[in-house]
Image (spheres, coloured by chain):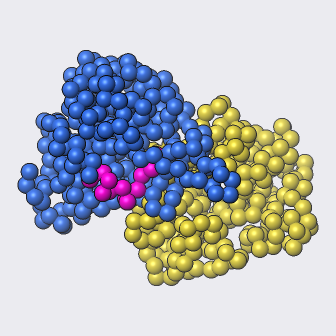
Chain colours: A blue, B yellow
Amino acid sequence: MSFPPNIKRKFWGKLFDSPIMLASGTAGFGEELLNLNCLAGVGAVVSKAVSLKPRAGNPPPRLLETPYGLLNSIGLANPGVHHVLNHILPETSNLPCPLLINVAGESVEEFADVVSILESSNVHMGYEINVSCPNVADGGAAFGVDPEVVLRVAMGVSRVTARPFSVKLTPNGGDMVLSAKAAVEGGASAITVCNTFLGMHMDWRTGKSIIKRKVAGYTSPALLPLVVAKVWQVSNAVSVPVISSGGVSHGEDVLQLLAAGAQMVQVGTRLMRRPFAGAELMDEMKKLTGE
Amino acid sequence: MLSCAVPLDYDCLVTRREEVLPGVVKIFFQCEGIAATALPGQFVQIEPSPGTFPVTRRPITINSLTDDGFELLFDVIGRGTELMAVMSPGDTVRVLGPLGHGWMTDPGSKWLLIGGGLGAAGFQFLKDSVDTAAILIGASCSDRVIPLDASFVVTEDGSTGSRGLVTSLISEEHLSNADSIAVCGPVAMMEAVWKTIPEKHRHKVQISTESRMGCGWGVCDGCSIPISDGGYKKCCKEGPVFPGTDIDWKRWKEAGL
């Protein structure tokens, strides 16, 4: 690797002008952002999670802003894989950048089931396998902390698709390096580091959490050093590319993650404040590196 | 439903700031794009301050349009609105809008507006756009009655108008005279209004909702409002205004939003 890192990246055999991916859950399937003209500077979009059956999602409130970040408890709300395949994916065929579909499952088998149904679409480049959601009771992060389960999920997905897929890991418990190695052994073509950190807001007057599921996923610009460390650890341990996720609000943050070993860098919560973050981050990076 | 203009992210100049009631601020923004495209009941996502924090914007209903922009009227209820309240003339503020689906207005429709406290912010724009039969306002006290030229005002402590709740102002005459009924205020007030309105008039009712919001344009699924079929709709995109029959009051109250 050369330093400062190149902004242009090679990933999954394709050249990307931008290392920036929009993180799952913050960009829909890309079509809303296309309507807003927000995809300038974006290398790829990762869809919201798709599950076999429709999921209504968690009861509100689903968001709680804290002084320096955001707690979310969305609960993988999505209309289910069949609706996504028949009604949403056709709308994404004019996205100006590749689409990765984020896949959630309630059992080891369900990940491969969802992927095999999505195989009849040709609009997406690959998948991100979500073994790490902190906001669901059935499965979610429990899969990602056990390397044995991660291996079986990845092997199941490998069997039903020739498309590349990344496995998105959790920072909450387990050894991320062991889970990453298991994912690669199972056929993963990248590792996404990482899903949200478990967080909670306690109402000290009542002793209750405002979020109905009590704990939630926490994102914040302040997580940057934690994600940089995990990206550095995982990218030194596996042979496949690492996609970072978390902590990005400025171009310098993206460069730092690339220098730590990320091949691509996801941005999520920043879009809530700056829907045109892709273009803004690219401008900031180009100014810093002169590329 | 009226078709909505594509929202844009504008740098808006603050031209005026007024404290209309204690802790309630009205800020005027110059923005010809929003003035030309916004519809009553729509909102904007505003950056409360420069820099990185807070990490989300604040969704605020457009109170009314001006010749070259729009005005927001809001209550200081937390850190975001506290930051917004000190915006002053000459500041430039990033504003995304107009967003969401506002009041469903049919030409020629006569409106009854029912507002609770600061929930009536936004009624000015509706009132300027439609034929209004009557405006009924309830508030806790005179410090919470926003200037609106209401037909009838009641307060819980009797400091403006007679003492009482807004539901006491709702009469069969008001309901029969209206083709459309706009309701906006705290959830408990809106539910009380809904229950006061007899079944035969409920199809006319539109409810303006609010929620803790992430993106504001329909992608993050954070601002869900429980609806009567057991599911959810997005406050930011399918709302913020919904037909009253859509709302699942019990689940919405449980959310404690």
Q: Quadrant of residue A153?
A: top left
Instruction: Tell me, yes or no, if residue A121 can be seen here.
Output: no
| Residue positioned most to the left | A2
- Residue A95 on the magenta span: no
Given residues A247 and B84, the one toward you in this image is: A247
- Residue A225 on the magenta span: yes
Given residues B229 and A239, the one toward you in this image is: A239
- Point out residue A50 in the picture as x, y percentages from the top left corner: 41, 30
Q: Which stretch is magenta?
A: A217-228
Q: Is residue A208 left or right of residue A51?
A: right
Q: Is residue A4 left or right of residue B186?
A: left
Dominant secondary structure of the magenta stretch? helix
Q: Classify B71 as above or below A107.
A: below
The quadrant of the image that shows the N terminus of chain B is top right
Q: Residue at x 41, y 47 (%)?
A: A197
Q: Is residue A215 left or right of residue A163?
A: right
Q: Classify A88 as above or below B178.
A: above
